[in-house]
Image (tube, helix red, strand yellow):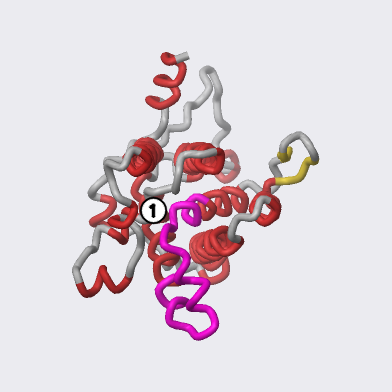
């Protein structure tokens, strides 16, 4: 059993493994009172006035207390982060990291702006950890890129992956969790999906091109498609008609 878990962990791609490790270590550290959540949560005033910039990162690493909800979100983090990194972003580690950076920036901006809007500030002030929202963003992006995959929810009913975010949102509401957290993840995920997949097809321009300095941080391996042995390809038609 221990060997199987170790193999599963080692097979994770680099970004997924790093994020899962940081999240588990941070959450366990808080559960054992080694780390105080009060030093991790997102507080714009402390960030700007006291220069506690680490809060912009640490609020994405803490998943509250270690209970069934924690296991639930760890499963979705490990599964859909890995699926994205190994498939949609295969050989593009820098692009995947940039997607997470974009999502974290959007989520942080929404919470900060929402906290200054009358009638909404009270709701947004309660959102001090965005780890669940970032996980939900990855689920949303995966569902948009794989909309026709058939899925089952607890064996109760089947649906296609396009409806996965809405099924999970409904489940969160049923168990009494805040819908705002999941909705923020959906907003960030849709912003990324539109700017990365929809907008370039409409205009031919790609606004979310990964900066060069981020690409330089990752040595991506080229994705090689193996050519079957003993297969010959016919020359282009124009070559066949040349004298």
- Residue 203 vs 155, above or below: the answer is below
Badge count: 1
- Residue 100 vs 230, above or below: the answer is below
Residue at horizontal 50 percent and vertical 56 percent from the top: 133
Residue at the disc numbered 1: 60
Residue at the far front: name it.
33
Where residue 8 sits, quadrant-wise, is: top left
- Judged left or right of residue 229, residue 38 is left
x and y, in percent, of residue 189 in the image? 53, 59
Residue at the far right: name it.
157
Asked if the magenta segment contains residue 54, the reply would be: no
Work out whether residue 193 can be spotted.
no
- Residue 87 vs 45, above or below: the answer is above
Residue at horizontal 48 percent and vertical 71 percent from the top: 124
- Residue 143 vs 232, above or below: the answer is below
x and y, in percent, of residue 46 in the image? 26, 69
- Judged left or right of residue 191, residue 23 is left
Q: 2 and 13: which one is in front?
A: 2
Label 1: few (<14), some (14–19) or many (≥20) C-alpha neighbours in 10 Å: many
Residue at the far bottom: name it.
118
Residue at horizontal 38 percent and vertical 42 percent from the top: 27
x and y, in percent, of residue 233 in the image? 55, 30
| Segment colored magenta | 111-135
């Amino acid at each position: 059993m221990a060997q199987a878990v170790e193999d599963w962990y080692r097979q994770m791609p680099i970004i997924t493994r790093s994020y899962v490790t940081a999240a588990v270590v941070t959450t366990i550290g808080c559960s054992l009172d080694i780390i105080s959540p009060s030093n991790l949560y997102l507080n714009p005033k402390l960030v700007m006035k006291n220069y506690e910039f680490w809060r912009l990162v640490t609020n994405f690493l803490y998943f509250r207390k270690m209970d069934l909800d924690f296991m639930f979100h760890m499963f979705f983090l490990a599964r859909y982060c890995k699926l994205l990194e190994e498939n949609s972003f295969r050989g593009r580690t820098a692009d995947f990291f940039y997607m997470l950076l974009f999502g974290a920036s959007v989520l942080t901006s929404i919470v900060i702006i929402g906290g200054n809007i009358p009638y909404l500030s009270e709701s947004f002030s309660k959102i001090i950890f965005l780890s669940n929202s970032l996980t939900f963003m990855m689920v949303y992006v995966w569902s948009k890129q794989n909309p026709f995959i058939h899925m089952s929810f607890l064996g109760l009913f089947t649906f296609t992956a396009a409806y996965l975010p809405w099924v999970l949102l409904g489940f969160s509401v049923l168990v009494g969790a805040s819908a705002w957290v999941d909705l923020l993840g959906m907003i960030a995920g849709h912003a990324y999906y539109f700017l990365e997949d929809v907008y370039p097809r409409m205009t031919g321009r790609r606004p979310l091109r990964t900066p060069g300095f981020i690409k330089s941080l990752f040595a991506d391996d080229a994705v090689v498609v193996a050519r079957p042995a003993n297969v010959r390809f016919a020359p282009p038609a124009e070559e066949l008609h040349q004298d």
